[in-house]
Image (cartoon, rainbow, N blue to C red):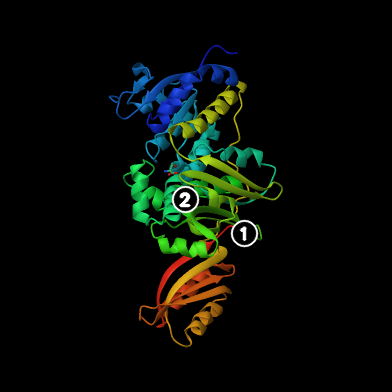
Amino acid sequence: MRTRPLKVALLGCGVVGSEVARIMTTHADDLAARIGAPVELAGVAVRRPSRVREGIDPALVTTDATALVKRGDIDVVVEVIGGIEPARTLITTAFEYGASVVSANKALLAQDGAALHAAAEEHGEDLYYEAAVAGAIPLIRPLRESLAGDKVNRVLGIVNGTTNFILDKMDSTGAGYQEALDEATALGYAEADPTADVEAFDAAAKAAILAGIAFHTRVRLDDVYREGMTEVTSADFASAREMGCTIKLLAICERAADGASVTARVHPAMIPLSHPLASVRGAYNAVFVESDAAGQLMFYGPGAGGAPTASAVLGDLVAVCRNRLSGSTGPGESAYAALPVSPMGDVVTRYHISLDVADKPGVLAQVATVFAEHGVSIDTVRQQGRLDGSGEASLVVVTHRASDASLTGTVEALRKLDTVRGVASIMRVEGE
Ligand code: HSE
């Protein structure tokens, strides 16, 4: 074993960074044995140096992250500060100064992954980011390496723990969205500003990363259709139950049937209770992968939290250090397929639509005609009259597979009918 240690600069020492530092210390001997050389924490860049960091030598702590990555003797920079800047500049600077990078930064990779990969390649360094998607769950490496000989057709995942906790709570207790969000906040799952999670920005970034790797195609955050889950109601869960379904916030990356394009989207959807993703409870994540040869695979585990995310970071650190010792680099970006990313209108799926309609002769025929005129085939229709004297009824239509564009046209036309008082909800049905 080499005795001269590999030097690691840690950028960020919050929930994840402090766990990375702890595991580097407590598992030092095992890490050295697995890598073939000791790894030394050479510096820790933080914003607030006054905060006590148990187990970290105060002499290593600095507020000058730029100086740390420019030291010239750093082998690996571990970036766990998140956000676009200064993370992007620090990572590119690390490459320029001869270090490889392990990052957990989904937002940055979803936005600028191609440029960062190019910078890593230019300088002959590694860029690894297993922790950026679904915390501890191995996903990037299985998609990039284990499935490199197969053809992935679909990735369907629950990649945000906070929203899965909220939806699970709504489903299992009948709680409304706000009540479930309040509990997620009280338990520390949801942040004070939960926008990134509940409006699905977090999941969309993860979908972009997964789609890019799965389809060997550049997929950026802007390519991902995104709908949050703040408007899911208890009534939607009741409708889902009647269909034998539950509701999950799903990230869905698909190759088109003709193989010529891909789509990536994140939105709430009904999913059959028999689907493996339906039983993913609480804040857990799971990703279901469908490929030509392997068939169906499911990856499940904790998608967030300090120690689980640090586990993924440490796995990357070991891989990058091994590459360094052997004078090689791991796989870089694979975007050779360069498939076009189609807009949401091209996505084909089934829909569950709840309408409030006038309860009088001919209304059902009128509604059915609008679906027919837009080429959307109806699978089932269920009408429930009301006893409140309103003269209205609830109409639930479940369609066969249709394009999102056709469905959007259908709904626009339905809204124009006098007899349609309102469109209570539209929910896609997935995983059948
Ligand atoms: N906020 C994310 C979640 C974890 O709730 O899953 C970090 O990606």
Residue shown at 46% from the left, 31% from the top = 307
Q: Is residue 168 above or below residue 421?
A: above
Viewer-proximal residue, 95 or 360? 360
Which residue is denoted by mark 2 in the rendering? 204
Q: At which x and y percent is residue 69? A: 42, 26
- Residue drawn at 57 percent across, 64 percent down: 349
The structure residue drawn at horizontal position 66% and vertical position 60%, both measured from the top left corner, is: 258
Residue drawn at 59 percent across, 67 percent down: 401
Of the residues shown, which amino acid type is indicated by label 1? Ala
Q: Name the residue under label 1.
A: 256
Mark 1 nearby-residue class (10 Å; few <14, some 14–19, many ≥20)? some
Residue lying furthest top: 3
From the viewer's side, name the closer residue of 106 and 411. 411
**Mark 2 neighbour class, 10 Å CA radius: few under 14, some 14 to 19, many 20 or more:** many
Say what secondary structure mark 1 lies in: loop
Q: Is residue 125 visible?
A: no
Q: In this view, does 154 lie to the left or right of 168?
A: right
Q: Which residue is situated farthest in the left direction here?
A: 50
* Observer able to see residue 116: yes
User: What's the amino acid at mark 2?
Assistant: Ala
Query: Where ligand 1 lies, by quadrant?
Result: top left
Please report contact status of discs 1 and 2: CB closer than 8 Å, yes or no: no
The quadrant in which the N terminus is found is top right
Residue 83 image offset from top left, x and y in percent: 39, 40
Residue 178 located left or right of residue 259: left
Q: Where is residue 317 in the image (x, y as percent from the top left)?
A: 52, 27
Q: Position of residue 93 (x, y in %)?
A: 43, 31
